[in-house]
Amino acid sequence: MLGRRERWIVAAMLVLAFVIRMAWLVLGPASRLEPHRSEMWRVAATFARTGQLADAYAPGSGVSSHVGPFNTIIEGLVYRGFGIGSLTSEMILAVLAGGVVCTLFYLLYRLAIELGIPLVARLGALAAVCFIPFNYFVEVVDFRIREGAVAAMILAGLVWWALTLDRKGPLTLRQVALFGLAAGFAFLINPGVALGVYAVLGLVALRNLPFRYWVPAAAILLVGLLAVNGAWIVRNEMVYHRFMLSRGNFGLELAVANHPAAVNAKDPRDVFNARMDEIHPAFSPQALARLKSYPQDVDYFTALGDETKAWIASHPGDFAKLTVRHLRDLYYPPAWLWDLYKTGEHGRVPKQAYVWLITTLALGDLALALFRRSRAHLLLIAAVAMPTLLYVIVQPTLRYRYLFEGILVFLAADLAWRLAAPIVMRLLGPRAALLEPKADGQAA
């Protein structure tokens, strides 16, 4: 029964997920449809007025290397046409964000099919990401401007694509070129995602691309990267007089997370906020004044990065301790991350319990898959490892975790169903055939 109706069930879930999120916005507090002010929002508003990607920290703070071009330009164009922060603009952006999120869910479902996750488990996981009101705020408020959902969508889509290429056999240079264009676009959104999908494609090529095509394939990928990012690279060269593939704020993020006060912090949230006030130009006048003492923001970020790298070189043990803590924060986030700026967030304990359960089940499922020598899961791990390695040397937040959230939910559902299925099937008896099609897999 489920197998025959799978397409309709998946479509209905996705449509309902979109409708619920729009209703959550419109029927909730009016603040949900107010502009979600951040560095990216300020840049988008400035772009709407002047056509410049500038003023990330305050009016007049100058051209910005803090944000990428994609989301900010789209929001800026919407603001230019319908008014900065107007209800119409925010609703348009919410519809776009909701569309991206539902596309992400669909791609996660297709990825689950390639991973061999059973029908009941993947439908259960889809229901969880669609209907459990856990990430609604970030999905249709925060991600109206931030790129988190777009990055997660690209990661899920390109890993699914890579797994299908690996399953179907020999790889052609045309396929490499198309994949390379998509991976190049990922660099504009999230460099960690781009590195991850390049790693997956490399593993696929090792098995499916003849050795004589490796050099041409590498050249094609480089050309694709430059083709997609060429305008952004030229812009950065003209503005900052340096080669920059992505954003220029990595030194700031590195400095926020790695410093002496963080090593043995009794209250990590207080230490985090104090560090933000000390060096982040969007958080305090003192930090903004320090930024303005440099010719451009990228020079300030470079100086912060150099200071932090020198501290890391002289304190490798402390850096290792912080890195391990950040890895834990990313996959087993502490309660304070739900109330990062002391805004009085409610329900932290059940949210934390849910996330920790999902992570534990997902890691168990991956371990089981590796024991079975599942190549598809190995490729997935390669894709997730690269952004993880970048996030653990900065301070992870719940917004960063969203990149992996959906993948973890589907993996967790897989293990949960494998554990529960024998009991459920025994209880259902002959009716168990309603739950699984005879040839599970490619229907959706």
Image (tube, rainbow, N blue to C red):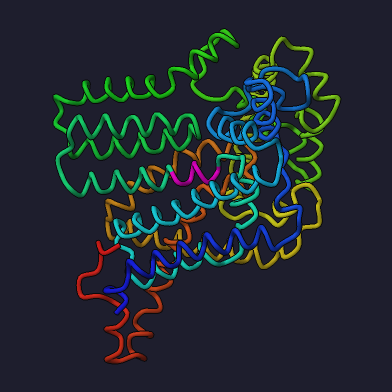
Front-lying residue, 366 or 408: 408
Residue at left offset 27%, top offset 55%:
373
**Left or right of 129 on screen, residue 182:** left
Q: Is residue 142 magenta?
A: no
Residue at left offset 76%, top offset 40%:
272
Quadrant of the image containing the N terminus: bottom left
**Residue 196, placed above or below residue 103:** above
Does residue 124 show up?
Answer: yes
Residue at left offset 60%, top offset 40%:
146
- Residue 324 at what x, y percent from top left? 59, 44
**Residue 420, placed above or below residue 232:** below
Front-lying residue, 217 or 357: 217
What span is in magenta? 148-153
**Left or right of 323 on screen, residue 187:** left
**Left or right of 6 on screen, residue 72:** right
Residue at left offset 48%, top offset 61%:
409
Quadrant of the image containing the C terminus: bottom left
- Residue 126 at what x, y percent from top left? 44, 64
